[in-house]
Image (cartoon, coloured by chain):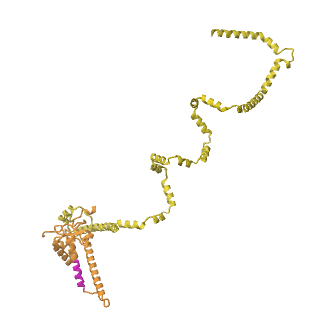
Chain colours: A yellow, B orange
Amino acid sequence: MGAALATARLARRGLGVAGRLSAPALRVALDPPLVPPRWRPLTLMERWGREWQERRSALVEHGVQGATHVAASAAEVVLPLVDLTPLVNGVLERLDLDAVAAQALADLDLATVVTQVIDELDVGLVVNQALDEVDLTGVVVEQVDLGRVVGQALEEVDLTEIVLTRVDLAAVVLAALDTLDLTELVTDRVDLAGIAEDVIEQVDLPDIIQESTGSVASEAVQSARLRSVTADEKVSALADRVLLRVRRGRAHRRNVDTTAALEGDAPGEDDS
Amino acid sequence: MVPREARRFQGDRAGFVTRFVAAGIDYAIVTGVLLLLYLGVAVVAFAFNPLSFNVPRAPFLVFLGIWTVIAWTYFATAWATTGRTFGSRVMGIRVVGHRGSIMRPAGAGLRAAFCLAFMPGLFWVIVSNENRSLQDTVLRSSVIYDWTKRAPERETDER
């Protein structure tokens, strides 16, 4: 390493010396003083350089076209002469495709690729095109165990809850009712006469009428009785005053035995 | 159920107004029965002799007598069975004996006869310090407020 460095330094120094020594000669050679300027080598080199820069892109393009043409012609000539199949088979035999694929997959960021593809794809168009070309119904009917799928789905889904929360049942029912002639349906399908007979048989109408009218009558009678009792008390009080008598108390009016008998009984239903 | 406001006077002897109204109802019923009887007789008479049919006529005393018989039967039967006629039932009162139980048939019959013979006896309720009519005072019966359904038991021993 030290030797190499020493050599490099020496070479550099040598070149510097050579450059300083050859510079005047080189300058005279390139720009001779007695030659007209247009014929001087330096002037000629500068002109050629400018011309090259101006025509470089056109020349390169021309060259590439020519090379492509030549290559295509050569391929046309060569490819028919070559049996590619054994060649490719040989390549494939020597290739470890699994390893290559694994390596490719490992190198690829599949998610990014797929995202990019999806971004660039008109998915709607693709799907529509695919759906146009595929008889989905036929495929599903033939290939899918529909009973099992539906059964599984129904087991996992609380249909009642979904319907209750997501469906406007009132609107559905109203729409259904709008389309139905309920009167006609009932008239056609329901044995109204039979139902009416059953109801009348099961309901004791006379009993109900008797109970309801009895209740009303009972209230009216009770009211009349209470008013009558009040009138009794007023008449008694008036008589007491007229007869200059000490107001008679309840004890005088109380029928002791009867009271005992009545208080022994549970209050019964009024019979009026 | 007896209403709360009526419970305080259940078992008390009834006053004049209530008894008077009840008696009025009962006399109206008896009069109605008499009228129906009269109509029945007329219809029967017409059915048997339509050509020479005349409205049945009878002296007032005959009507009065029949009315009295109907009334006596009605009162005596009612007082001896439930202690209440229809009028008493409407007004929520009941006729009981001196022990507070349903009168015996003889007592009920006697009271009915006494009431019909001397109707003004009811006015003694106003004067009486114990809300008793003249008949009640003599026969030791009582008319009480009783809105309950069940009648007290009948008297079993002699007064």
Dominant secondary structure of the residues highlighted in magenta in the image: helix
* Numbered-mark total: 0
Q: Is residue A133 above or below residue A69?
A: below
Asked if residue B111 is among those painted magenta in the image, a careful observer would answer no
Residue A230 in picture, x, y percent from top left: 27, 66
Quick check: A200 left or right of A149?
left
The residue shown at (30%, 67%) is A218
Q: Quadrant of residue A254?
A: bottom left
Quick check: A87 left or right of B55?
right
Q: Quadrant of residue A233?
A: bottom left
The residue shown at (59%, 35%) is A113
Residue A205 in picture, x, y percent from top left: 35, 68
Magenta span covers which residues? B59-71
Q: Quadrant of the N terminus of chain B?
A: bottom left
Asked if residue B61 is among those painted magenta in the image, a careful observer would answer yes
Q: Is residue A207 above or below residue B51?
A: above
Q: Quadrant of residue A92?
A: top right
Q: Return the residue found at the far bottom.
A: B52
Residue A32 in picture, x, y percent from top left: 84, 14
Q: Could you say which is closer to the camera, residue A217 or residue A158?
A: A158
